[in-house]
Structures are given as C-alpha cells and as structure tokens.
Amino acid sequence: MSNSLNITNDGSFDADVINSSTPVVVDFWATWCAPCKAMVPHLQKIQDELDGKVKIVKLNVEENQATATRYKVLKLPTLLKFQGGELVDTMVGNPGPRKLRAFIEKGI
C-alpha cells in the first residue's frame, strides 16, 4: 500500500504521463477546491487496489498552469485519463466513489 498519490508538474508531465507504459489518470486540483480534497481518499484507495494496472497522479493547477492550459482544464476537479500517451477520457467534478472507480477502471 502506498502512502500518497504521485505528483506531477509542468516539467515532468510528459515523462510521468505521456511516456508512461501504464494507463495514467491525472487529477487536476487546487488547494482551495473542497471537492478536490474530498476525492483524495477515494483516489488513494483505488490506486492501492489497482496497484500496477493504473497510475494516478495529481497536478496542482495553481503551480502548473501550462499543463492545465494545454489540456483546457477550466473546472476543478478534472480527471484526464491517458493511455499510450493519448488522452482517452475526461471527467469533470467529483462524481462520488462508484462513478470515480468506474471512470478509472474503464478500458484498463
């Protein structure tokens, strides 16, 4: 069981996400976003249970605006799923644990 979710930033995004051999879900969040904070325990649990099948990384949009702009992230939280370096799915908002898990597990 891991202690925390992975963190990415503008400088490491391509290495962490685009070049990953594992599907990656990127959680775009901000410190002031209550729904973002509420989602963290669910993301952690899903990552722990799907260990090795998917990687979940967090990107703070306040500190990494270039990546948020690159993917046109306008609302928080936003989850983007990447497979083979390609953006394959998007979810905006905190849908609750069941829909969150379904989004992450779809296609992996």
Image (cartoon, rainbow, N blue to C red):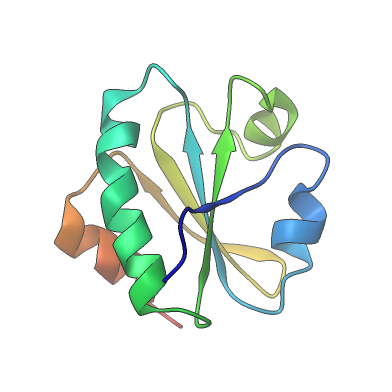
Q: Is residue 2 above or below residue 63?
A: below
Residue at coordinates 68% horizontally, 24% vertically from top-left? 65
**Residue 106 at what x, y percent from top left?**
37, 76
Residue at coordinates 41% horizontally, 71% vertically from top-left? 1
Q: Is residue 46 left or right of residue 95?
A: right
Q: Is residue 1 left or right of residue 54?
A: left
- Quick one: 83 or 13, which is closer to the camera? 13
Q: Is residue 83 above or below residue 44?
A: below
- Quick one: 94 or 87, which is closer to the camera? 94
**Residue 100 at what x, y percent from top left?**
27, 59
Q: Is residue 83 left or right of residue 56?
A: right
- Quick one: 95 or 39, which is closer to the camera? 39
- Quadrant of residue 37 within the rendered picture: top left
**Residue 51 at what x, y percent from top left?**
46, 79
- Quick one: 58 or 103, which is closer to the camera? 58
**Residue 10 at what x, y percent from top left?**
76, 37
